[in-house]
Image (cartoon, helix red, strand yellow):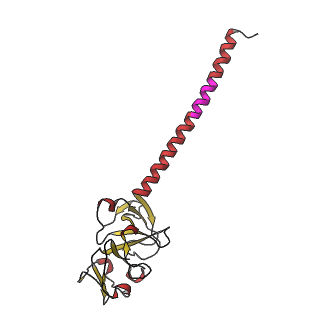
Amino acid sequence: MKTRRNVVEIKFNKEKETEKKKSLMGRFFDAFIFIFFAAVLGYVFVTFFFQTLHINGSSMDKTLVDGDTVVINKFQYKVSKIKRGDIIAIKGTDSVYYDVKRVVALPGDTVQIIGGKLIVNGKKTEIDTFSEGFVYSGLAEKKLTLKNKEYFVLGDNTKNSIDSRYSNIGNIQETDIKGKVVFKRNEEGKFEKIY
């Protein structure tokens, strides 16, 4: 025979079990919401603001070497203009990877490589990274004039870089520029600004 006390205890235990289930479901739901928003925030961050890249190859030696990790700022060129000397990430030919090169000429500029020297707007450029000179002039053997939203890019390692001198790359369209390389991971694992 159930006494009032037993009925109350059974009811209390059932309520406790129900609360436990609700509490577990609530924690599961909270964790799901947290993970969902973290994933969305991560996606937005990588898609619109910053992304890390690993340098593959030697086209940017000595500035960036094979295996370096860099950070690109995808938002930079939404608020400022692309400048001569900027190191940029460009959508690669296979659209999965990015190419990293240096901007040497802007829309409206003329570009030519004569006698191993880079000539922009009729003046010899004195960019330290190209001090070794150019063995191959390619498309820049004849004077090129860049159209609106076109950029001429080179790898710092001019002897081992596929860049705007080659017909399969040519002048870079502004829409293919995905961001500015702003940081490089140093030997201690810290990121340092690239100038």
Residue 79 on image: x %, y %: 30, 59
Magenta stretch, main secondary structure class = helix
Q: Is residue 128 above or below residue 1?
A: below
Q: Is residue 36 above or below residue 133?
A: above
State which quarter of the image contains the C terminus.
bottom left
Give the number of callouts.
0
| Residue most extreme to the front | 148
- Residue 182 horizontal side relative to residue 37, left or right: left
Magenta stretch: give its range: 16-25
When asked about the image quadrant of residue 55, the answer is bottom left
Residue 193 on image: x %, y %: 33, 63
Residue 22 in the magenta stretch? The answer is yes
| Residue most extreme to the bottom | 115
When asked about the image quadrant of residue 156, the answer is bottom left
Q: Is residue 195 above or below residue 13?
A: below
Residue 21 on image: x %, y %: 62, 30
Residue at left offset 38%, top offset 60%: 74
